[in-house]
Image (cartoon, grey):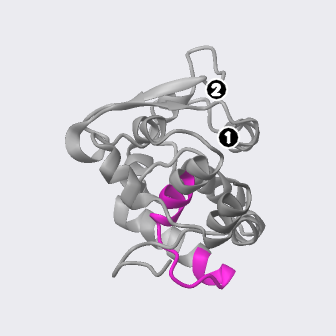
Amino acid sequence: MPLREGQAKVLTDDEIKRVYAVAGAGRTGKRDTVLLDFSFRLGLRVKEMASLKIDDVVGDDGHILNDFHLTAHQTKGNKGRTIYLTNKKLRKNLESYLDPRVGDLNRHLFKSQKTTFTPNSLQQVFKRIYRKSGIKGAKSHSGRRTFATRLIEKGYDVKSVSVLMGHSSIQTTARYISENPVRLGEMVAGL
């Protein structure tokens, strides 16, 4: 399905593997891998990622939480939502990334060398990773669109996906989901 003007590309499984390989190989590999996890495995926007503090994802005991709440201030449209940190790969990557950083729970989760990220500077990080991966049409929102599309392809209902995305309407979620011609053919073949 052709992308609408300005719409971020939904990545294939092979492209996702390539992006993770490129991100993990760099000097900031642990951080960039977790950024990709928060995009592809949680469906977060760059604004949401930029706002996160370590204590959003780590409890007082130093362990990664099973879930946390994004406040209305952190999200688009002033609609808070619960984020579930239950994916095993994400938890492993996050634990590895956080290990030396847990001492100060009030610090931002994602930082560049000298400062905290803004949504725009995080967009540039994603742009660099996608460029190095050789993937055209991918943007910081590609992870979020891929997250929604993959959940629907796995058979989850659009209402539940809408809740995870923080959308007020399933019509908004439906616009995120990319049609997969291979899957459509398989559906018809299975009748």
Q: Secondary structure at mark 1?
A: helix
* Residue appearing at x 27%, y 39% in the figure: 168
Q: Earlier in the sequence, mark 2 or mark 1?
A: 2
Extreme residue in the top direction: 61
Residue plotted at (69% across, 36% down)? 87
How many numbered marks have been drawn onto this rendered protein structure?
Answer: 2
Residue 83 magenta-highlighted: no
Residue beneath disc 2: 64
Q: Residues within 10 Å of mark 1 (few under 14, many from 20)?
A: many
Query: Residue 126, how many percent across, how many down?
Result: 53, 69
Image check: 188 left or right of 39?
right
| Magenta range | 130-147
- Name the amino acid, label 1: Leu
The label shown at residue 94 is 1
* Quadrant assignment, res 36: bottom right
Residue 118 in view here: no
Q: Residue 162: where, in percent of width, then height? A: 41, 41
